[in-house]
Image (tube, grey):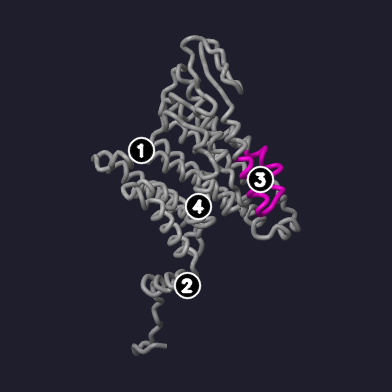
Amino acid sequence: MKMQIKNGRLSPYTKNSIISYGLVIGAFVIVSILNSMGMVSSSLQGQLVPICCYIVMAVSLNLVVGISGELSLGHAGFMSAGAYTGIVVSGILETSGLPIYGRLAVAIICGAIVAGVLGFLIGIPVLRLRGDYLAIVTLAFGEIIKNIMNIVYAGKDSHGFHLKTNPDLGLEEGGRMLLNGPMGATQVQRISTFAAGFVLVLITLFVVQNIMNSKQGRAIMACRDNRIAAESIGLNVMKYKLMAFTVSAALAGMGGALFGLNYSTLLPVKFNFNTSVLILVFVVLGGLGNIWGSIIAATILTILPEALRQFADYRMLAYAIVLILVMIFTYSPKIKNFTQGFIDKNFKRKKPTAQTEGGGQV
């Protein structure tokens, strides 16, 4: 990350980058210290890796929705492709002698490659559409990917890896089923860790924020702001939107691989339309194009449903009320103006007035 200083002050890009990295590193250090002291509950410990995964998903989707300006509702499809690819690769490498972190890294990389290729292939026809049409088609592709996972069967034995669209894999005795169609992935060795999630979040932030501040990122935002003007100066709008869509899909695949290897059983239904909408909610509540806002929204809205579980009868009602209040406070012009006025009045340093030699003001 380049430090940019203008007129003795940090540029807005550098400030946002420092805030984003500071939030992630500070949260990791605090949670690690509290965990070592035994002050983190078991339910929160179980949420640490999913929180990291959802942060990766929210930041990566923000690249498409906030930076590129396209509404995508199929992000869970790329997440599922990465999850099942990671599970299969990890299962194949179990007997390879690789250490756990090595297997996890290879699984995440393979998940990113598969999801990125899918994003590129899907983006070619999809990104020629605009507005609601784009949202509907990306939703359809997300559901297609999920339904494909419902008919995929994979296993391994001494003869190698087997992949079919029917359950008759012909595995020998002692062979292991990795993917079992609608039953999903079963008997998965859980190798995801909070430390790996922390590193993955940092990688995602580095990729997205450097794209935003690059020549390509400025071209992407120019295409978002005024497509006709961008085309008139020779920018290939399709190329830059496809770049953002592909990178976003690859990052979603990485988050999906980490997510999949955090559970012993994973069903395809986990990656349905509701998951895509949930990720979009993280982005909208955090602010379009606001990276650290996506981090905070993904963290709070992942913890909140579990924190309200003791109020079982009213949990989802309270969750919906919180979402409505956040939307009001985030997007209300009156509240924005009041907050900005309060900050300007109480926290901004006032300019010193010039004085004459006699002590009077000029």
- Name which residue type carries label 3: Val
> Of the residues under marks 4 and 2, which one precedes in the sequence?
4
> Of the residues under marks 4 and 3, which one precedes in the sequence?
3
Marks 4 and 3: CB-CB under 8 Å? no
Q: Position of residue 348 (x, y in %)?
A: 40, 71
Number of the label disc, if any, that sits on residue 163: none
- Name which residue type carries label 4: Val
Specify whether 352 is left or right of 147. left
Q: Which residue is mark 2?
A: 334
The residue lying at 49 percent from left, 48 percent from top is 278
> Of the residues under marks 2 and 1, which one precedes in the sequence?
1
Relative vertical location of residue 78 with respect to residue 6 in this rendering, above or below: above
Marks 2 and 1: CB-CB under 8 Å? no
Q: Which residue is mark 4?
A: 281
Q: Which residues are magenta?
A: 119-142
Q: Which residue is mark 3?
A: 137
Asked if the stretch drawn in magenta spans residue 129, the answer is: yes
